[in-house]
Amino acid sequence: MKDPTRRSPILPAQLKRYTQRQRQRLRFLIFKHPNSDPSKIFTLLIIMFKKFSSEDVSSQNQVKASVQRKIRQSIAEEYPGLEPVLDDLLPKKAPLIVVKCQNHLNLVLVNSVPLFFNIRDGPYMPTLRLLHQYPNIMKKFQVDRGAIKFVLAGANIMCPGLTSPGGALDEEVEAETPVAIMAEGKQHALAIGFTKMSAKVIKAINKGIGVDNMHYLNDGLWKMERLD
């Protein structure tokens, strides 16, 4: 029997533009986590690029030289393996465009090609197309075969999918770290993830979500090879 004292959470007006399924999921998350920061809950649904398109873009701006240097420095520090090719990827004299999208998502473009993204002021993460060109720039986790279809549907990565015989963890990885999500029997990364906990904790508790799925093969960002 329905408890009359339990009210459905109010959906913020600015989120009415999303699909019915997204709104239902938001109501559930807000109801289950009433004391959580709402902006973090909203971001959980938006950072995934499942239906991302040019309609999600709020603005595009060529950044000034000081901002460009800061972005280059952040990327160089996060991915030292890119240093030999960083001048080719982000030429100092080429315009660097930062695209601001809904819910604090930012894209970094050079010559209209998305190369990196981040949420708010978080770490920059490469697009999968860029990662496939330079596959060794990120720490790697591997999911077992059974998890592949779920990751490719946009699901977050559960701990058991990483700790099973077909999975693999880099035990040096800490919480809140961008990682490449590899798959058992596959050559290329199928997703970009952001760890919710360290690899050692994932291995120890072996339950729940270990890695947030930020961007995966055939999502909206993958399909957006250029943004003119």
Image: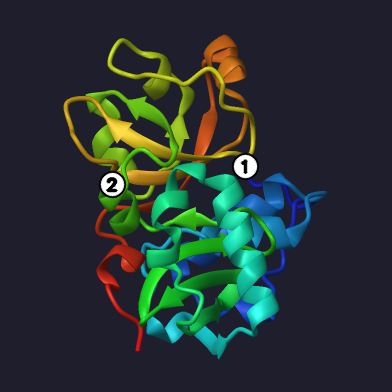
Q: Position of residue 144 (x, y in %)?
A: 28, 23
Judging by the rendered image, the residue that carries numbered circle 2 is 152
Q: How many circles with numbers are drawn on the protein?
A: 2
Q: Position of residue 55 (x, y in %)?
A: 42, 86
Secondary element at image label 2: loop
Q: Is residue 121 above or below residue 66?
A: above
Which quadrant of the figure has residue 120?
bottom right
Query: Which residue is located at x 49 percent, y 72 percent?
Result: 108
Q: Is residue 227 above or below residue 107?
A: below
Answer with left or right where residue 120 lies relative to residue 24.
Answer: right
Query: Which residue is located at x 61 percent, y 53 percent?
Result: 123
Answer with left or right where residue 79 lies relative to residue 154.
Answer: right
- Which circle, 1 or 2, is nearer the viewer? 2
Name the residue nearer the viewer: 174 or 16: 174
Which quadrant of the figure has residue 198?
top right
Residue 1 — which label?
Answer: 1
Answer with left or right where residue 37 lies relative to residue 114.
Answer: right
Which quadrant of the figure has residue 109?
bottom left
Name the residue nearer the viewer: 19 or 175: 175
Query: Which residue is located at x 61 percent, y 35 percent?
Result: 196
Q: Position of residue 35 (x, y in %)?
A: 82, 49
Residue at the right extreme, as displayed: 35
Amino acid type at image mark 1: Met
